[in-house]
Image: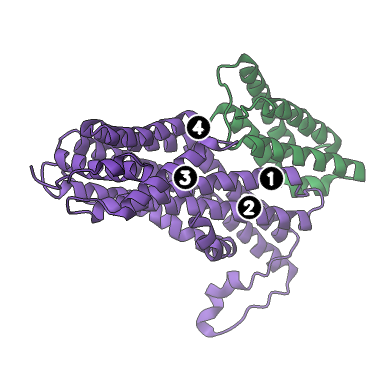
Amino acid sequence: MQEALQQLEATYFTLQGQINMLSTACKTQEQRDALSTQYVKARANYWACVNKAFHDDDPQVASLTTKVGAANQELTQAVRQMGDIATTIKNITSVVTLGSQLAKMVISL
Amino acid sequence: MPGFRLGPLRPTLLRTGRGLRFAAISVVIAVFAVGCKTPGDAAAAATQLSATASMLTGYYAALDTLLSETDQLYQIQAAINPVAPYDTQTKNYVTDTAAEIEKREKVAAALTTLAQEFAKLSGSTASTDASTAAGNLESAVAGLKLSSVSMSASNVNLMKDAVDLIVKAAQEHKERETADSIDKFTAALDTWFKSEEPYYNSIGATYANLTQSLALALIAQGQVDPSSFLAAVFSPYGLTPQITDPALKSKVQAVMIAQVDQKSAALATAQQNATTSMEKSLTEMASRIHLVATDKPMAIRAAPITLAQVQSWISLVPQIAPAAASAQSSSAGTTKSN
């Protein structure tokens, strides 16, 4: 699979796999809303690209893919440790924002 | 020359699109016959192509079932967990992806019909059914190219060009070029499938990931009745389990969670293995067509053995996703006839 889609899939799968635990960990409605927004964005980023292609030789795509990959590792770690939910939501927002930038670079025919 | 004999093509037929397709089929059969070292090679190649294309149709239909099920699962998730609503944008993406898979199913079905017509022909003329089948394949491939969310456009163009070449070569009575075009079509189909293989596997992995996530959530909330899980213990005695002890319930839940994790991984792996087997079958088929088209003997007459592994997964899908498979089966007449 193209690396870009692979990273968007990784973000979505991590959130999908932990969405119930993360929902339970939220202490306020504001946190739940923020988590919901990021989950929906991550899922849309993935589905927007599942049947499309990226220009693998585009340096911007390569750079963003690397950034999303690194952010995914931090996300996995944060979700696994599940410390402060507010910090975890910040991590999620960070990787999903990068993912949205990457998803915008998909080739539209 | 063993095999089929090509009858003269009427000029009036050649001036029409239908005539061109008729000519194409006639030349195809003639070319397969020209290339065969034994009289049965042409028919065997056509039968194998039909079996492979038919399995490809089933493979895409099963993927489509998983996408329908995914759509339903997102709706269920939204009802269970308000943090995970099913937004319109995602729903549209899922619907678009399913529509793209259905287009691929139509290409495979059209190729199946065309190959079946090849296999049936044994005389000097082609049937009008074969002519119609060739036209349907042209239409199905053209539909892929026009798609707004087309995967692997360049590979679709290769197939489209190959179909166009078949018609053109027939118009000019260039039998060798026609053989090359068929060879190119099956090779392009194989390349196209390989290029899309990761997307197909991603669809399967998404389905497995989503079912796992929902199942684990419901188990954690104590919303799963463990009775059927314990059936292995009590069914020989005609007894029904009734677990009331919270500690025991918790232990059983832990085992159920482990089983869900294990089966989710197995679901994704089974789909990926089916994709690999389908790809191997297409490669094998393309190489056999190449043999026939280049005047070499086709030693193996049986369908590619990897097709059995694809069939195994296709048979599994209605069991893991019975609701979607049933709904698709009831609407199949409408979809497939287009």
The chain assigned the colour purple in the figure is: B
Whichever of labels 3 and 2 marks the residue nearer the N terminus, that label is 2
Judging by the rendered image, the residue that carries numbered circle 1 is B92
Determine whether B252 is above or below B68 in the image: below
Determine whether B131 is above or below A86 in the image: below
Q: CA distance from mark 2 to mark 4?
A: 23 Å
Q: From the image, state whether disc 1 or disc 3 is nearer to you.
A: 1
Q: Looking at numbered disc 1 in the image, what kind of residue is underneath it?
A: Asn
Do the residues at discs 1 and 2 belong to one chain? yes
Q: Chain of mark 1?
A: B
Whichever of labels 3 and 4 marks the residue nearer the N terminus, that label is 4
Whichever of labels 2 and 4 marks the residue nearer the N terminus, that label is 2
User: Residue B176: percent from the left, percent from the top?
Assistant: 21, 32
Whichever of labels 1 and 4 marks the residue nearer the N terminus, that label is 1
Quadrant location of the C terminus of chain A in the rendered image: top right
Q: Are marks 1 and 4 in contact (CB under 8 Å)?
A: no
Q: Chain of mark 3?
A: B
Q: From the image, state whether disc 3 or disc 2 is nearer to you.
A: 2
The chain assigned the colour green in the figure is: A
Q: How many other residues sit within 10 Å of disc 3, few (<14), some (14-19) or many (≥20)?
A: many
Judging by the rendered image, the residue that carries numbered circle 3 is B272
Specify whether residue B262 is in view.
no
Q: Nearer the viewer, residue B167 or B53?
A: B167
